[in-house]
Amino acid sequence: MEKETVGIVGIGHMGLPMARRLLAAGYPVVVYDPQPAGVQLAVADGAEAAESLAALGERCLTVITMLPDSTIIDAVVRAEGLGEAMAPASTLIDMSTAVPSRTVALSRWLAEREIAMLDAPVSGGVAGAERGSLTIMVGGPQSLFERYIPLFEAMGKTIHYVGGTGSGHTIKAINNMVSATTMAVTSEALALAVKAGIGVETALAVINSGTGRSWSSEYKFPTFVLNHAFNSGFSIGLMRKDVDIAIELGQEHAVPLFVAAAAQQLYRFAIGHGLSEQCHTTIATILEEMAGVRLDGTHEVIANLGGGGL
Ligand code: NAD
């Protein structure tokens, strides 16, 4: 059976590999992004480029958004014409990481136009998107979720139905709150180990076979930090946004978030020092600077760094 055409708005670090997975699974894909680079690569792999948001909305009964944040999602859907162009009975699937209350408001605005909505953010990074092994967490009407399971399975390996509209975005912010925090505390831990005379590889090997391990210690440090590659494709600015969403949720639900609040300060500090566009794993370099050590396997202690680069 021929698969339905899927529109994707936002062909960046994540949108491009997700478009490629859909193409590989046999979905006709129409893409839109004001930046031509990702669009050109998607077209080279068989996607069709829409000339405008409205053209994409008119052409596709299912539209995925993979955009930086709620402000841009709202602008694209409401002000820039995507929502107006989409037909009644079509579906918007927002796979970005966004503010849950704004997702609920957007779904109401769409419902007035008889357009259904799922929030379906993802975890697993650019590598997970390339491999089609993302974790996808979905909020919205369950019957609508069930209709789109094959679409989600083309991009992800583990698909969770979480609950009503906004619950996908809620659990995604909570997941990234944990992820941001383990990245921060592992950076501190390794700076301390090196300063105390233990090689960074030894420290990491112990943590990774001990109870201190996490995705940050097992995957991110060896893959992006120790070699100073810093090329995860997920920026400090986006991670800061996610921690901010989680902290706001804590406020909304009157739940204290002591540890996440400390991590939030570190990410804010990084933004204040102009690192917003850098890979989020460069957060480790801030601890390097502050502690005066290198976490690149050179076992180097640099006593005179003194935070001068910051
Ligand atoms: P990105 O900045 O690489 O891509 C976003 C794309 O949106 C860009 O290509 C940009 O040109 C496009 N865009 C911006 N404004 C637009 C507009 N008005 N109309 C159409 N397109 C527009 O971001 P990303 O890393 O791909 O992340 C996208 C979303 O996925 C974010 O919400 C992020 O938090 C989330 N996320 C990212 C990762 C990751 O590893 N990068 C992992 C999980 C979730």
Image: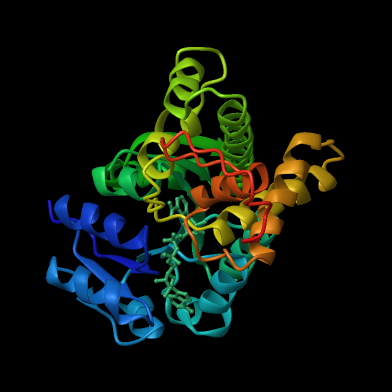
Query: At 31% across and 45% down in the image, what residue appears?
Result: 127
Query: Which one is nearer the viewer's eye here, 191 or 281?
Result: 191
Residue 141 in the image, given as x and y percentages of width and height: 53, 46
Query: Which one is nearer the viewer's eye here, 139 or 210?
Result: 210
Residue 231's place in the image compared with 212, above or below, is below
Residue 254 in the image, given as x and y percentages of width and height: 87, 40
Residue 153 in the image, given as x and y percentages of width and height: 29, 41
Q: Where is residue 222, by image quadrant?
A: top left
Q: Where is residue 149, by image quadrant?
A: top left
Q: Is residue 176 left or right of residue 29?
A: right
Residue 197 in the image, given as x and y percentages of width and height: 56, 24
Query: At 47% across and 25% down in the image, what residue appears?
Result: 199
Query: At 84% across and 47% down in the image, what residue appears?
Result: 251
Query: Which one is nearer the viewer's eye here, 297 or 134?
Result: 297
Report if residue 92 is visible in the image. Answer: yes
Query: At 43% across and 43% down in the image, what residue appears?
Result: 225
Residue 243's place in the image compared with 35, above or below, is above
Q: Is residue 24 left or right of residue 101?
A: left
Tell which residue pokes out farthest to the top in this image. 210
